Image: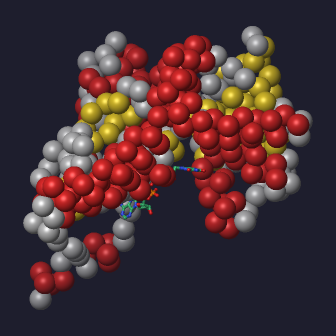
Amino acid sequence: MLTADQVLIAGGAMERPVPFPGWTLPGVMNAGAGQILFKAHGIVPADGVVLAGSGPLLLLLAWQYLHAGVEVQALLDLTPMINHLYALPRLPRALLARHYLTRGLFYKRDLKRAGISTLHNISELRAHGDERLESVSFRHRGRRERLETELLLVHFGVIPATQLTQVAGCRHEWDAGQQCWRPCLDAWGQTSVAGILVAGDSAGIGGARAAEHAGRLAALQALHALGRLDAASRDRLARQDRQWMQEDLHIRPFLESFFRISDAMLRVPDDDTLVCRCEEVCAGAIRAAVADGHLDSNQVKFLTRCGMGPCQGRQCSQAVGHIIAAASGKTVAETGHYRERPPVNTLTLAQLAGLYPEERE
Ligand SMILES: Cc1cc2nc3c(=O)[nH]c(=O)nc-3n(C[C@H](O)[C@H](O)[C@H](O)COP(=O)(O)OP(=O)(O)OC[C@H]3O[C@@H](n4cnc5c(N)ncnc54)[C@H](O)[C@@H]3O)c2cc1C
C-alpha cells in the first residue's frame, strides 16, 4: 500500500476485443500476443498463420514474420473500403508525420514482393473447429471463402486501459473517433479527481512517443501541484514537449478514420456468439435483456452476469456497449460503461489478506 498526494496513472493500452463466431477457440489469439511472444521470447508459429483484422500492427507483424521465415498464409484486411474516402480529407495533415506513412508503404511493398496474399475489404470473419481452430472463413468480393489453418491472429486496434481510472472514480467520455472510453483530462493530464493524473495510451491512443511527452507534462504539473515548481517554470519546461507531442499526433486523425472498425463487425455478432468468455454469455442474451427494457451496460451486467467473471469485463465491456446501442437505437455513450470493481488485476487471497497487516495485530 502506497499513499501519495499526486498519482500519475500510465497503464497503457490493450487490444480491442471484438467477438466473432469462433473467437474463443484455442488457436485464435490476438496479434499483439503473437508479437510479444516473438519479440520477448523468440517464439514464432511453426506451421503457418493467418492474420486478420484492421490496423498498422497487422502489417508490421506480417512483415516481421516474413523476415523471421514464418509462413504467412494470408493477411485478411477487414478495413472497410469506404474508410479510404473518410480518411482522405485527413491525409494532408498526416503528411506532416509522413515517416509513419512511408514505413507502412515499405512494409506493403515487401509483403507484395514476397507473394503474401493480402485480401482487402473482408467481412463476416469466422473461426471453425471442434476442439481447436481448424479453418477460417470469410466473405471476399461477394463470395464465401475458407482457409485451412491452425493459427489465426486477429487485431482490431488498441483501446486505452481505463480500469484504474474507473476504479478511482475519474470521469470518462466516449471518444467517437477512437471508438473507446477515455478519461476526461485537462491539458496537463489531470483527471476530474484531484491529485490523479493520467499519461500515455491509457489517456487515449497516441503512440509511444506521444506517451513520453504526455508523461513529462503530467510530471511537471505534479511537481507544480506539490509546490516544487512555479507555474512560469512549469510552462517553460513544458513548451518543447507540448510542441513535439502535437507534431507526433498529426497522423492520428488519419489512422483513426482509415482503420475505423466497421459497425457491422462491432455491433452485430450472431445471437449464439460468445461475448463474455468468463461467464459464457452470448450476444442473444444481451439482446434479450435489451428487449426487456435494460438499456444500460450495468443493468445488462447485473441481469446476465456478463462482465462479472475473472477478467472483470475487460474482454466484453466494449462489445456489450455496442450491442446494446445497436439493439436500442442509442449511442454507445448513452449505454454507459461498466462500473469497475477492485481488484483491477487478479490477486491471491494471501495477497489480499496481506494488504492491511496492522489490522491483524
Ligand atoms: C499489442 C500492442 C502492440 C503495439 N505495437 C507497437 C509497435 O509495434 N510500435 C509502436 O510504436 N507502438 C506499438 N504499440 C503502442 C505502444 O506500445 C504504446 O503507444 C506505448 O507503449 C504507450 O506507452 P504507455 O506508457 O502509455 O503504456 P505502456 O508502455 O503500455 O506501459 C504501461 C505499463 O503499465 C503497466 N500496468 C498496466 N496496468 C497495471 C496495473 N494495474 N498495475 C501495475 N502496472 C500496470 C503495464 O504492465 C505496462 O508496463 C503497441 C501497443 C499494443 C497494445
Would residue 93 be found to the left or right of residue 311 on screen?
right
Instruction: Give above or below for 293 relative to 98.
Output: above
| Residue 334 horizontal/vertical position (percent) | 26, 23
Q: Closest to the observer: 97 or 73?
A: 97
Can residue 294 be seen? no
Total marks shown come to: 0
Q: Which residue is drawn at 27% across and 33% down?
A: 173
Q: Closest to the observer: 270 or 103?
A: 103
Q: Which residue is drawn at 18% across and 83% down?
A: 357
Q: Which residue is drawn at 50% across and 27% down?
A: 93
The quarter of the picture where residue 358 lies is: bottom left
Can residue 117 be seen? yes
Dividing the image into 4 quarters, which one contains the C terminus?
A: bottom left
| Residue 148 horizontal/vertical position (percent) | 83, 36
Q: Residue at x 48, y 52 (%)?
A: 208
| Residue 108 horizontal/vertical position (percent) | 76, 35
The colour scheme applied to this rendered structure is secondary structure
Dividing the image into 4 quarters, which one contains the N terminus?
A: bottom left
Would residue 233 be found to the left or right of residue 216 on screen?
left
The quarter of the picture where residue 178 lies is: top left
User: Which residue, as the protein is rendered here, is positioned at the far bottom?
Assistant: 361
| Residue 144 horizontal/vertical position (percent) | 77, 18
Instruction: Give above or below for 201 relative to 298.
Output: below
Would residue 138 be found to the left or right of residue 6 on screen?
right
Q: Closest to the observer: 140 or 350?
A: 140
